[in-house]
Image (cartoon, rainbow, N blue to C red):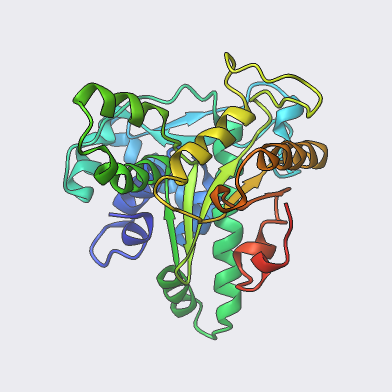
Amino acid sequence: MQLRDIVCHPYLKREEELLGVIYKLRMAAAEQVADVMGISKKYVQMLKSDLNKEGEMILTHYQRRRGARRLPFSKEYTLGPRMYALGPAAKSTIEAIVGHPIYFKKHTGKQQVHYYGLNDILVRTLKQVIEDESRDDELEARVTAWERLQWLNTQETAIVIEQAWAPLLEKDTAKEQKETRKDLIHPDARLLIDGRPFWIEYDDGSERLRSPEEEPDYSLTTIEDKMGRYLFSLTPIQNKDPVVWVTPSPIRRDNMRDLWEEICCSQPHEDVPNMYFFTPGEEQSILLDSQSELSVTY
């Protein structure tokens, strides 16, 4: 069951839909959940309050300090928004919704900035698709928008890639299969619009970015390492879906683009997936324009 199946489900109560949306987004601000569900922020807060009367259904994480990585937050926030995540009491409800057992782990709140920035890509895209429908009936426009749009979280993207790898691993031992799967990339999200697929990466500046002049240090987890894992994961399965990176800093965006160009120079051109780098909002130029990919450069 995907996010759009939960949002468009004909029989779920609003409280169940709220839990399902938070489960799929992992962690989200009230206004982001409201935009996804098509209701008001006040209504989301009321639903949360009602749910928590039955137990620890939804946890609230606060932004405790102001720092450079608060960049994606709206200007209305002094520190950042309250971010919602599932509580342990919600596990059985989610399992009833999706129809299978789920693994539950409490979020620590350390990835607030990451999830806020990632969810905003979805919200911006959804709003634009709804606006493009240009219908008098907003509900009808929203339903049509969700028919055009799919959003998979990082667990779901991992399944997509692992399933594509399955035929390649058939002759390997169980140990070899486990080692290979460990090295496969887990994109932050996968977005499909009108059937056009994109891998989505949101960069909040927390991972080290090597400058083109530096020597690689493969002992560190870096943006370069992540790019290499994309090459390792997508090339053997012949997946050429574009990878869209979004980061709040224009300087970091340009440095990431330069690093990718350096990596591309050492690879056969036909083996290299297209990667594009944007600041928040710029990504709409490629996501919503079916011709834009032909003109955007690295």
Residue 156 in sight: yes
Quarter of the image for residue 68 reads: top right
Left or right of 184 on screen, residue 202: right
Which of the two residues, 43 or 129, is positioned nearer the viewer here? Answer: 129
Tell me where residue 296 appears, x and y as whole percent. Answer: 72, 61
What residue is at 43 percent from the left and 68 percent from the top?
Answer: 146
Depth check: give the residue in front, 129 or 161: 161
271 vs 10, nearest the viewer:
271
> Which residue is painted at 48% across and 57% down in the image?
191
Tally the numbered discs: 0
Task: Say which residue appears at 69% left-offset and 21% top-offset.
Answer: 65
Left or right of 81? Residue 139 is left
Q: Is residue 4 above or below residue 131?
A: above
Which residue is situated farthest in the top direction here?
A: 219
Quarter the N terminus occupies: bottom left
Q: Is residue 63 left or right of residue 44?
A: right
> Looking at the image, which residue sits at the far front?
268
Residue 45 seen: no
Q: Quarter of the image holding residue 224? A: top right
Q: Which residue occupies 43% across, 38% down?
A: 26
| Residue 264 pos. (x, y %) | 67, 43
Quadrant of res 118: top right
Residue that lies at the very extreme toward the bottom in this rendered image: 136
